[in-house]
């Protein structure tokens, strides 16, 4: 499942996870895995998402995407919250980082025929890259480090009211087929009765 995320100016690919059911409506659950924010370290096909010069790629450990070009060249880097699914190097020297699948997973459950969302949990974290800068005395001796700034989650769930409307939308093609059969049957009956009357 491919979707464009405007916050990071790129498409991400979600992988099929399992069947999912909500309020009697069946669908499929799709999740983001560790390939989403890889830049060619683990998955060579993801090397196109490396924003450094070609000879420097891959320039980051897996799990963080350089979104600087999307954010007016600010040192903005995107990951899953608490560096979930990211390389262990990002967890070093940081207090309070506790990646947890139940809380930090990016997932979408969708009814396949209509595209109606059943459950959406989209979570991303914004990080800043701190590195030494010779032009400012206070920044000459700082360590190079990915600093988590904030993370956010967008959630959407199917409500009982919308589930009723969704059932109508899902069954509408079946209703249309049966209605067509009824119309054909009525047409055949009228044709037969017309022939019978003439005879």
Image: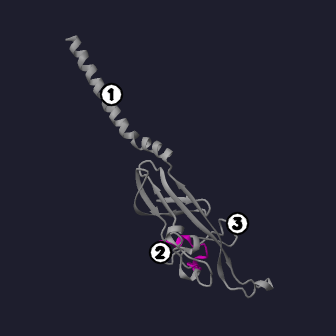
| Residue under numbered circle 2 | 43
Looking at the image, is mark 1 or mark 2 nearer the viewer? 1
Q: Earlier in the sequence, mark 1 or mark 2?
A: 2
User: With respect to residue 154, does 58 lie above or below?
Assistant: below
Q: Secondary structure at mark 2?
A: loop
User: Residue at point 70% right, 70% down?
Assistant: 74
| Residue under numbered circle 1 | 183
Where on the picture, by quarter, is residue 170? top left
Q: Residues within 10 Å of mark 2 (few under 14, many from 20)?
A: some
Q: Earlier in the sequence, mark 3 or mark 2?
A: 2
Q: Secondary structure at mark 3?
A: loop
Question: Which numbered disc covers residue 72?
Answer: 3
User: Residue at point 39% right, 62% down?
Assistant: 18
Q: Nearer the viewer, residue 102 or 45?
A: 102
User: Residue at point 23% right, 19% down?
Assistant: 192
Q: Earlier in the sequence, mark 1 or mark 3?
A: 3
Q: CA distance from mark 3 to mark 2?
A: 27 Å
Question: Which residues are drawn in magenta?
Answer: 43-60
Question: Left of 17 or right of it: where is 150?
Answer: right
Q: Is 54 inside the magenta-drawn segment? A: yes
Question: Which numbered disc covers residue 87?
Answer: none
> Are dots 1 and 3 in contact, CB under 8 Å?
no
């Amino acid at each position: 499942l491919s979707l464009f995320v405007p916050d990071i100016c790129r498409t991400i690919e979600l992988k099929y996870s399992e069947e999912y059911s909500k309020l009697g409506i069946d669908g499929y659950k799709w999740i983001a895995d560790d390939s989403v924010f890889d830049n060619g370290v683990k998955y060579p096909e993801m090397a196109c998402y490396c924003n450094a010069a070609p000879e420097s790629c891959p320039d980051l450990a897996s799990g963080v995407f350089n979104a600087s070009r999307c954010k007016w060249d600010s040192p903005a880097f995107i990951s899953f919250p608490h560096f979930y699914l990211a390389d262990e190097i990002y967890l070093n020297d940081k207090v309070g980082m506790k990646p947890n699948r139940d809380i930090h997973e990016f997932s979408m459950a969708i009814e396949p025929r209509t595209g109606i969302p059943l459950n959406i949990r989209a979570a991303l974290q914004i990080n800043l890259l701190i590195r030494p800068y010779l032009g400012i005395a206070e920044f000459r001796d700082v360590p190079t480090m990915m600093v988590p700034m904030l993370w956010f989650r967008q959630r959407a769930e199917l409500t009982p009211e919308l589930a009723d409307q969704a059932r109508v939308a899902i069954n509408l093609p079946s209703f249309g087929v049966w209605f067509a059969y009824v119309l054909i049957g009525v047409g055949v009956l009228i044709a037969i009765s017309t022939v019978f009357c003439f005879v």
